[in-house]
Image: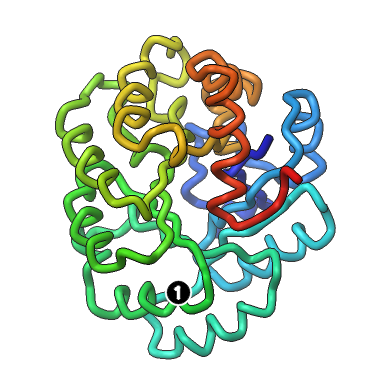
Amino acid sequence: MLDTHVHFWQFDPIRDAWIDDSMKALQRDFLPPDLLPELTANGISGCIAVQADQSEAETHFLLQLAENHDFVKKVVGWVDLRSPDVEQRLDYFSQFEKLAGFRHIVQGEADVNFLLRKDFCHGIAALEKHGFTYDILVFPHQLGAVLEFIKLFPRQKFVLDHLAKPYIKDGYLDGWAALMREIAKHENVYCKVSGMVTEADWRSWKYEDFVPYLDLVTEAFGTQRLMFGSDWPVCLLGGGYVDVVGMVRRYFSEIEVAAVMGENGAKYYSQDFLS
């Protein structure tokens, strides 16, 4: 069993200003020893650490944690994909065995077409030769650009984080669903079943709130291109680690759980975690 989306940080109120007072529970350090009991209690043997800060220092911080903790199987870091020197930076980062790929916090970009800009696409084009993955972090209003973006890179391995953050709290479905179906037609794109509780009402969500969204991504991507991610510790805003694991185990059959919570993530990140 593999959790494909966790974060670690040593809390800095300036750097981590996105963790505002509505998220007071997250205003502290979260490190691998804090996560390990949750993984163990839920029968999960490894995790993928994903960047939360846009700096190469963050990438090195996560790589060091992965070096020190075997259950941190891979890292999704950050590099400036818009830099003229991106190919040299990727050459440098290719020495780190546990570095799987990269992510940019596109959801925070004011430019709705950020993904399509020439400098960013130049960086994405450089990922393939190194075998690096790319996590797509967007809001639903950016999915039109995502669809155009993925068409440009048919051989690049992509994964959509958090189901592209559908508006679960408001119950909006159709616009998001139409674009997700189109995106899912591209077989190089996977989807993380993650981050749902924080898109719902943190304090009063129920399992049934998530079923229409799970139905859609299961229909569109199939159970072979979905992978479980807890989004720990952010998921703690909406309950406990056991709650997000329980949602996935309740929705999928036992055979599907083996794929969604293990085999698919291992395949995507090209690791023999399960051997």
Residue 95 visible (yes or no): yes
Q: How is the image coloured?
A: rainbow
Q: Residue 201, located in which quarter of the rendered image?
A: top left
What residue do we see at 55% from left, 31% from top?
A: 235
Q: Quadrant of the N terminus?
A: top right
User: Where does the image place residue 81, in percent across and percent down from the top left?
Assistant: 41, 75
User: Where does the image place residue 220, in percent across and percent down from the top left?
Assistant: 29, 34
Q: Residue 263, located in which quarter of the rendered image?
A: top right
What residue do we see at 46% from left, 21% from top?
A: 202
Looking at the rendered structure, the number of numbered marks drawn on it comes to 1
User: 243 above or below 122?
Assistant: above
User: 32 above or below 62?
Assistant: above
Residue 14 visible (yes or no): no
Residue type, numbered disc 1: Leu
What residue is pinned by disc 1?
127
Is 1 on the left-hand or right-hand side of 267? right
User: 183 above or below 25?
Assistant: below
Is 258 on the left-hand or right-hand side of 275? left
Crowding near the residue tagged with mark 1, few <14, some 14–19, many ≥20 C-alpha atoms within 10 Å: many
Element on which disc 1 rests: helix
User: 168 above or below 11?
Assistant: above
User: Where does the image place residue 246, in percent across and percent down from the top left?
Assistant: 59, 17
Of 83 and 221, nearer the camera is 221
Of 198 and 191, nearer the camera is 191
Is 216 on the left-hand or right-hand side of 12? left
Of 158 and 72, nearer the camera is 158
What residue do we see at 80% from left, 62% from top?
A: 67
Q: Residue 209, located in which quarter of the rendered image?
A: top left
What residue do we see at 22% from left, 73% from top?
A: 117
Of 128 and 86, nearer the camera is 128
